[in-house]
Amino acid sequence: MTRSTFLIALAAAAATVGTIAFPAYAQEVTTSTEVRYADLNLADGAGKAQLHARIKHAANLVCGVPGQLSLSEYSAARKCARKAVAKAQPQIDLALARVGTDYAANGRLVVAAN
């Protein structure tokens, strides 16, 4: 290998190192939506049921459940939706604890996939 060929190969290798993707630094994309509940009376069962229905619907939307999916895709989307509802549970508990306070008037929480 001549010196000029070696330098070209070395330059090409150095240029390639800068273009390698490092997954550890990749940011995970999360799909989310806001669920509003200020119009609901969370002090009664009907209002609580409506809040849970909205959250379940939002989880299905952010996880892609309503689409035309294969059986394995549908299974993964349902699992995602169950996780999204579970992750929203602390916000639901907080909303129910704040019934009748000024904080309840702002009524919204976030449902996120992943």
Image (cartoon, helix red, strand yellow):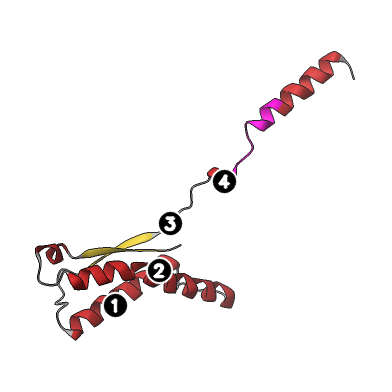
Residue where numbered disc 3 is placed: 30
Q: Which residue corresponds to mark 2?
A: 84
The residues bearing labels 3 and 4 have C-alpha atoms spaced at a distance of: 16 Å
Mark 3 element type: loop
> In the rendered structure, which segment of residues is drawn in magenta?
14-22
Task: Please provide percent x and percent y for residue 82.
Answer: 43, 74
Which quadrant of the structure image shows residue 33?
bottom left
Give the alpha-carbon distance from disc 4 to disc 2, as whole Å: 24 Å
- Residue at 40% over, 65% down: 62
From this view, report whether residue 8 is shown above or below residue 45.
Answer: above
- The earlier-in-sequence mark between 3 and 4 is 4
Side of 41 relative to 36 (left or right): left
Amino acid type at circle 4 is Ala
**Residue indicated by mark 1:** 52
Name the mark nearer the viewer: 4 or 1.
4
- Tell me if 6 is positioned left or right of 55 in this view: right
Q: Position of residue 61 (x, y in %)?
A: 39, 69
Q: Is residue 111 magenta?
A: no
Q: Is residue 66 visible?
A: no
The answer to the question of whether label 4 and label 1 lie on touching residues, with beta carbons closer than 8 A, is no
Q: Name the residue at 57% across, 46% down.
A: 24
Q: Along the polypeptide, which appears first: circle 1 or circle 3?
A: 3
